């Protein structure tokens, strides 16, 4: 049995990424938790030293839970390209550099993938709910599709303008947010989290 979070509990959202914070807050809104972000609390951003999404999500959740004495929810996610052996993957944020230039990061994906015929790509998301006693509950979601060039649309975040989910024609940067949020990697991980931990 997963450890659950009571209605009305205070929960730290362990992210400094405003795009993710907006998506996570929206998904938590109906669950009656009092969400406060790591940014608002002035928590430092821990270094993401794990080799995979799950490891980095755990590390971020546990750092925020230890610093605040509250349960904390962290997301580690990224964009993975088959022709690049899954890169940028856990380095998705780092490919955008310190100025968080995702137009440049998307160009880098395009350059490195070159003229390959293999356009398969996916978004992955690990969510970890961590408590001050170091207990964790972890969930994983993935959405498959293709990368396209040129990137299209100005909605969403990060690599959204170059990703088309399987069976669709619009990029995540073009589609209405509700449509992305119905089936994205984050939504898939979130559904599992909500079912297991928000009784
Ligand atoms: P991190 O989890 O903070 O290491 O950052 C993950 C990075 O992956 C983000 O900065 C985005 O660039 C990218 N990413 C994660 N989720 C999405 C998404 O839903 N759309 C587009 N890019 C995403």
Image (tube, rainbow, N blue to C red):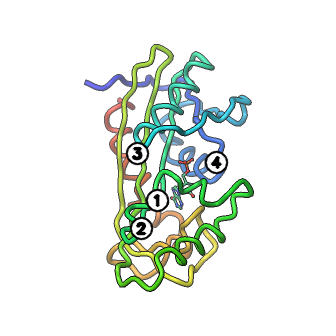
Which residue is at the front of the view, 166 or 33?
166
SS of the residue under disc 2? helix
Badge 4: residue crowd in 10 Å (few <14, some 14–19, many ≥20): few
Residue that numbered label 1 is attached to: 181
Report crowding for label 1: few under 14, some 14 to 19, many 20 or more residues within 10 A (C-alpha): some
Report the mark closest to the observer, 2 or 3: 2
Q: Which of marks 3 and 4 is nearer the N terminus?
A: 4
- Identify the residue at horizontal 61%, vertical 69% (top origin): 155
Judged from the image, the secondary structure of the residue bearing numbered disc 1 is: helix
- Choose between 90 and 146: the one closer to the eye: 90
Where does label 4 land, which residue? 17
Q: Give the image location of residue 64, x and y in percent.
A: 58, 26
Pick whichever of labels 4 and 2 is earlier in the sequence.
4
For this view, does 22 lie left or right of residue 80? Answer: right
Image quadrant occupied by the C terminus = top left
Marks 2 and 3, the one that precedes in the sequence: 2
- The residue under the point 56% across, 84% down is 150
Calculate the distance from the C-alpha at mark 2 to the C-alpha at mark 3.
27 Å
The answer to the question of whether label 1 and label 4 lie on touching residues, with beta carbons closer than 8 A, is no
Q: Please, what secondary structure does the residue beneath circle 4 have? A: loop
Asked whether disc 3 touches disc 1, contact meaning CB atoms under 8 Å apart, the reply is no
Q: Which residue is drawn at 62% across and 19% down?
A: 68
Number of the front mark, 3 or 4: 4
Residue that badge 2 annotates: 84
Query: Where 160 sits versus 135, above or below?
Result: below
**Residue 154 found in image quarter:** bottom right
The local secondary structure at tag 3 comes to helix
Q: Residue 81 location, x and y as percent? A: 41, 67
């Amino acid at each position: 049995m997963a450890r659950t979070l009571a209605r009305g509990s205070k929960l730290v959202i362990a992210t400094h990424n405003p795009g993710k914070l907006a998506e996570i807050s929206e998904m938590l809104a109906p669950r009656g938790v009092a969400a406060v972000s790591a940014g608002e609390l002035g928590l430092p951003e821990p270094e993401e030293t794990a080799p995979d999404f799950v490891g980095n999500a755990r590390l971020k959740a546990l750092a925020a839970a230890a610093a605040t004495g509250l349960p904390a929810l962290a997301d580690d996610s990224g964009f993975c390209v088959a022709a690049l052996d899954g890169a940028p993957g856990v380095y998705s944020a780092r490919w955008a550099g310190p100025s968080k230039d995702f137009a440049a990061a998307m160009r880098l994906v395009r350059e490195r993938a070159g003229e390959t015929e293999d356009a398969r790509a996916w978004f992955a998301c690990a969510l970890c709910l961590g408590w001050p006693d170091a207990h964790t509950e972890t969930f994983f979601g993935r959405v498959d599709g293709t990368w396209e060039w040129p990137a299209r649309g100005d909605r969403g975040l990060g690599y959204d303008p170059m990703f088309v989910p399987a069976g669709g024609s619009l990029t995540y940067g073009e589609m209405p947010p509700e449509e992305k949020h119905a089936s994205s990697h984050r939504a898939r991980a979130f559904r599992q989290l909500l079912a297991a931990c928000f009784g």
